[in-house]
Image (cartoon, rainbow, N blue to C red):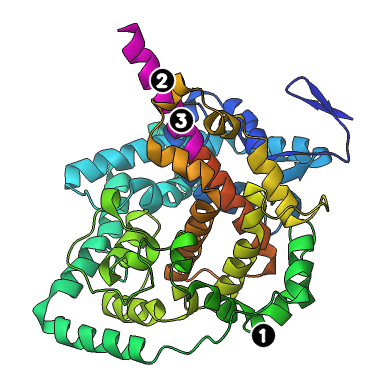
């Protein structure tokens, strides 16, 4: 038995990894604030770029991986973060110096967290706290200069410059026409194979490797894309606002605030969306544009079969979110996703809002809560597309993290938007 936050835990129980990270982070004190958010939790990028790969190292310590941690391992996870406290505090201080160096150098492109978090961690390891380093400012300037001189990174600005350059326009248009003219016929939509249910039943705990291999080798993800072909189907799946999937244009502009749905985006908008997240996309810009043109004409508009299989899994599991497909097995992915969604108080609140409150919640948010299946599948596509752009593989061990992580992302986004809407309404009422 162990205790955390006043709650007694059985050793066989599992606890939220996010909650454990937040609790361990809070114990480090104000020195790590530059790596955290306003709520005192570590930033998502802090977890992704520093805590996971450099401190917890879940690849070498699988017990620290996943969305939940065995209660018996909770104390070890906390101790590991606590032991890294001094270097994390130094990392935060180096990051402040590097941001000052960026301002001095006039650098505005790229997300400074993505570009410099790991460099700052290296500085902290090599030199300690910058207050104890006489040449700290010079070292920070050198980090910025090195990042600025780096080549081989695809940026939103570079993609736009390449796509709109008249010297490339004719060739790119020809490649786009050829890719869509040569689209492979998908045939009739397949019945879900046994392996699909086998993997959904096991992916949250111990993925069935044979089922995964059968789905990938049998190209079930590609064949499942046939479900998007009937008029209106891709729209019902949340991937387009059009009746049928159409060939994209090359594009000449892109904006994060006005991005169309995935299949309605131009080639420029697709690459812009990936680059604008702040996640580094390595490679040649011209080659990335050509690859995106080819990807747009492939099944599910993804290049790799593993990603398409995950989308097929998501498409099969998503109906459970709105009760149209409820599986009883407690460890089935469908039931786990449905349980996570249905236990959210804000979901019930939006679905049952009294007339007086309904007016303050944006129509778009109400529609997204009621149509969560489409929102979920759209965000899953975006996640998988981003992984392809960054050259990140997908395997059976990542299935559940992707399926569950995307739903958590949808929930956090919608919950925050509802909270903001109700808060604005309360402020207006008081004034």
Q: The C terminus appears in which quarter of the rendering? A: top left
Q: Is residue 138 left or right of residue 196?
A: left
For label 2, the residue is 423
Q: Earlier in the sequence, mark 3 or mark 2?
A: 3
Q: Earlier in the sequence, mark 1 or mark 3?
A: 1
The structure residue drawn at horizontal position 77% and vertical position 19%, both measured from the top left corner, is 6
Mark nearest the camera among 1 and 2 is 2
The percent coordinates of residue 320 (x first, y second) are 67, 52
Within 10 angstroms of label 1, few (less than 14), some, or many (20 or more) residues? Answer: few
Q: Secondary structure at mark 3?
A: helix
The structure residue drawn at horizontal position 30% and vertical position 40%, both measured from the top left corner, is 99
Front residue (pair 197, 322): 322
The structure residue drawn at horizontal position 48% and vertical position 74%, both measured from the top left corner, is 230
Q: Earlier in the sequence, mark 1 or mark 2?
A: 1
For label 1, the residue is 217
For label 3, the residue is 418
Q: Does the magenta-highlighted stretch encompass residue 380?
A: no
Q: Is residue 36 left or right of residue 335?
A: left
Q: Is residue 2 left or right of residue 62?
A: right
Q: Does the magenta-highlighted stretch encompass residue 424?
A: yes
Q: Is residue 178 above or below residue 264?
A: below
The percent coordinates of residue 380 (x first, y second) are 52, 59
**Gap between marks 3 and 2 measured at Cα:** 8 Å
Within 10 angstroms of label 3, few (less than 14), some, or many (20 or more) residues? Answer: many
The percent coordinates of residue 311 (x first, y second) are 57, 67
**Gap between marks 1 and 3 measured at Cα:** 43 Å
Image marks 1 and 2: residues in contact by CB distance under 8 Å? no
Q: Which residues are drawn in magenta?
A: 414-431
Front residue (pair 377, 364): 364
């Amino acid at each position: 038995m162990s205790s955390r936050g006043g709650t007694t835990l059985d050793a066989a129980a599992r606890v939220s990894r996010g909650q454990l990270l937040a609790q361990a982070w809070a114990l480090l004190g104000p020195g790590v604030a530059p790596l955290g958010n306003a709520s005192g939790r570590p930033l998502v990028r802090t977890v992704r770029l520093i805590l996971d790969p450099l401190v917890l190292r879940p690849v070498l310590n699988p017990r620290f991986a996943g969305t939940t941690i065995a209660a018996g391992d909770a104390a070890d996870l906390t101790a590991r973060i606590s032991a890294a406290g001094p270097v994390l505090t130094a990392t935060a201080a180096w990051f402040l110096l590097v941001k000052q160096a960026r301002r001095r150098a006039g650098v505005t492109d790229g997300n400074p967290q993505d570009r410099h978090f790991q460099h700052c961690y290296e500085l902290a390891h090599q030199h300690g706290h910058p207050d104890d380093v006489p040449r700290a400012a010079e070292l920070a300037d050198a980090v910025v200069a090195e990042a600025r001189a780096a080549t081989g990174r695809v940026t939103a600005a570079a993609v736009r410059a390449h796509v709109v350059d008249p010297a490339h326009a004719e060739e790119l248009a020809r490649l786009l026409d050829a890719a869509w003219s040569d689209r492979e016929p998908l045939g009739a939509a397949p019945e879900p194979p046994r392996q699909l249910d086998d993997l959904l039943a096991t992916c949250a705990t111990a993925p069935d490797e044979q089922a995964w291999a059968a789905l990938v080798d049998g190209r079930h993800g590609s064949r499942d894309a046939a479900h998007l072909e009937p008029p209106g189907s891709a729209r019902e799946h949340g991937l387009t606002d059009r009746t049928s999937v159409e060939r994209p244009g090359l594009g000449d502009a892109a904006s994060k605030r006005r991005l169309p749905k995935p299949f309605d985006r131009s080639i420029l908008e697709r690459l812009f969306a990936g680059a604008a997240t702040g996640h580094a996309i390595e490679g040649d810009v011209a080659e990335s544009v050509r690859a995106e043109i080819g990807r747009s004409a492939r099944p599910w508009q993804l290049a790799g079969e593993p990603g398409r299989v995950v989308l097929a899994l998501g498409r099969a599991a998503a109906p459970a979110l709105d009760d149209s497909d409820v599986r009883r097995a407690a460890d089935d992915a469908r039931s786990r996703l449905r349980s996570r969604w249905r236990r959210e108080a804000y979901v019930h609140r939006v679905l049952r809002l009294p007339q007086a409150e309904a007016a303050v919640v944006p129509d778009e948010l109400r529609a997204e809560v009621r149509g969560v299946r489409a929102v979920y599948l759209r965000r899953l596509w975006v996640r998988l597309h981003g992984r392809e752009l960054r050259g990140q593989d997908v395997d059976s061990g990542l299935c559940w993290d992707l399926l569950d992580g995307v739903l958590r992302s949808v929930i956090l986004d919608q919950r925050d938007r509802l909270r903001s809407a109700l808060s604005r309404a309360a402020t207006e009422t008081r004034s």
